[in-house]
Amino acid sequence: DAGITQSPRHKVTETGTPVTLRCHQTENHRYMYWYRQDPGHGLRLIHYSYGVKDTDKGEVSDGYSVSRSKTEDFLLTLESATSSQTSVYFCAITGTSGRAGYNEQFFGPGTRLTVL
Amino acid sequence: QQPVQSPQAVILREGEDAVINCSSSKALYSVHWYRQKHGEAPVFLMILLKGGEQKGHDKISASFNEKKQQSSLYLTASQLSYSGTYFCGTEGLSGTYKYIFGTGTRLKVLA
């Protein structure tokens, strides 16, 4: 258990409304990520962060913004939600496995977002 | 651009072997493999690094051909618990911890 939580776990909203998803980690890891998962597309990177206030775009960043003001929190905001943003959103961190010292990604439980 | 995985889906009987391939259009520093059960988050299986180092799972093996920018995951003597969707995650040569995932391979093991 890498100590990653996401909130909310489920959300239904209407087109045009703003939505913020929160990812919280308790392990003090530097790298945090937001992915969306859709059938046929696998996991696609939206944004990632390599430190407080340091973020970079992923493959599908249009329509999304992120903020990281503290090490433990990474927020994903949909400024004006659209139906095409209906998806399952996963937060992840990159941490070092204690067993052999290699990096692996740990994923949060996911947030299912429906935009009507 | 997402790495391409093949096959898209495979059905096995318990005890049979399978190979899942991941092909990238970019030069790679590392490849990760993950398995996701239905309704759950992906779980790390193993990492393959440029230069041949491999770390991770005890019972699943993989290869990484740097020249061809390809990786393969080998599932031998499959068990029912191997069922799920497998993803490769690739990291470019700059080693920036920015991972791009493949489209996934659905694997089902039947008794």
Image: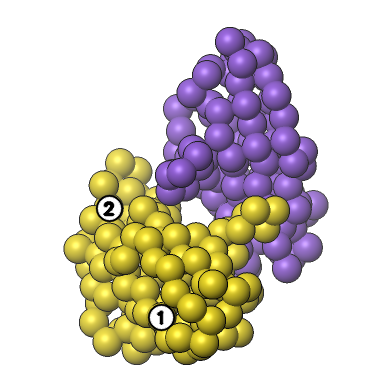
Chain colours: A yellow, B purple
Q: Nearer the viewer, residue B10 or A115?
A: A115
Q: Residue at x 62, y 26 (%)?
A: B108
Quarter of the image with the C terminus of chain A in it: bottom right
Q: Residue at x 40, y 57 (%)?
A: A110
- Residue linked to disc 2: A2
Q: Is residue A52 above or below residue A25?
A: below
Q: Chain of mark 1?
A: A
Q: Is residue A48 above or below residue B63?
A: below
- Amino acid type of the residue tagged 1 in the rendering: Val
The residue tagged with tag 2: helix, strand or loop?
Answer: loop
User: Quarter of the image holding residue A29?
Assistant: bottom left
Residue A36 as seen in the image, left or right of residue A75: right
The residue tagged with tag 1: helix, strand or loop?
Answer: strand
Q: Nearer the viewer, residue A77 or A100?
A: A77
- Residue linked to disc 1: A19
Q: Nearer the viewer, residue A17 or B30?
A: A17
Q: Nearer the viewer, residue A54 or B56?
A: A54
